[in-house]
């Protein structure tokens, strides 16, 4: 479902399935939060290949950012359609989107 690993720069990186809907978020939420609490470095949500996100995923992003701080949380590799969804929700104002 969701893959997580420490990348070559020491960041905790998460990769997600192509559709991150409410059901997926219900399954992954606690695991993400547990791993984030144990990691002291940067946290990256890598959305390469993700075509759909829901508000449940936005909540995971925001909660993670609040937990680790904006300077340690990044959302990367957004497809244009998904990036537009983040922009419509005004999340580019609180999350570092790359």
Image: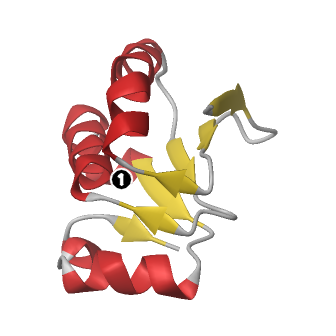
Q: Give the residue displayed 33% in from the left and 79% down from the top.
A: 85
How far from the left and from the top, in percent, is residue 19?
53, 55
Relative to 69, 10 lies left or right: right
Q: Nearer the viewer, residue 27 or 84?
A: 27
In this rendering, is residue 33 above or below 96? above
How far from the left and from the top, in percent, is residue 2?
61, 33
Q: Give the residue displayed 71% in from the left and 29% down from the top.
A: 6
Count of numbered labels shown in the rendering: 1
In this rendering, is residue 26 above or below 77? above
Relative to 63, 26 lies left or right: right
Quickly name the residue at label 1: 71
Q: Give the residue displayed 40% in from the left and 49% down from the top.
A: 73
**Residue at far right of view:** 8
How far from the left and from the top, in percent, is residue 34?
39, 13
Which quadrant of the view contains residue 63? top left
Q: Nearer the viewer, residue 93 or 2?
A: 2
Q: Nearer the viewer, residue 13 or 1?
A: 1
Check disc 1: other Cα within 10 Å, few if <14, some if 14-19, many if 20+.
Answer: few
In this rendering, is residue 48 above or below 32? below
């Amino acid at each position: 479902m969701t893959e997580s690993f420490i990348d070559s720069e020491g960041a905790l990186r998460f990769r997600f399935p192509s559709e991150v809907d409410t059901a997926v978020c219900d399954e992954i939420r606690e695991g993400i939060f547990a791993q984030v609490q144990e990691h002291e470095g940067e946290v990256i949500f890598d959305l390469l290949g993700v075509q759909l996100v829901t508000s449940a995923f936005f909540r995971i992003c925001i909660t993670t950012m609040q937990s680790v701080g904006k300077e340690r949380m990044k959302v990367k590799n957004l497809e244009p359609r998904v990036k537009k969804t983040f922009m419509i929700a005004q999340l580019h104002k609180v999350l570092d989107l790359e």
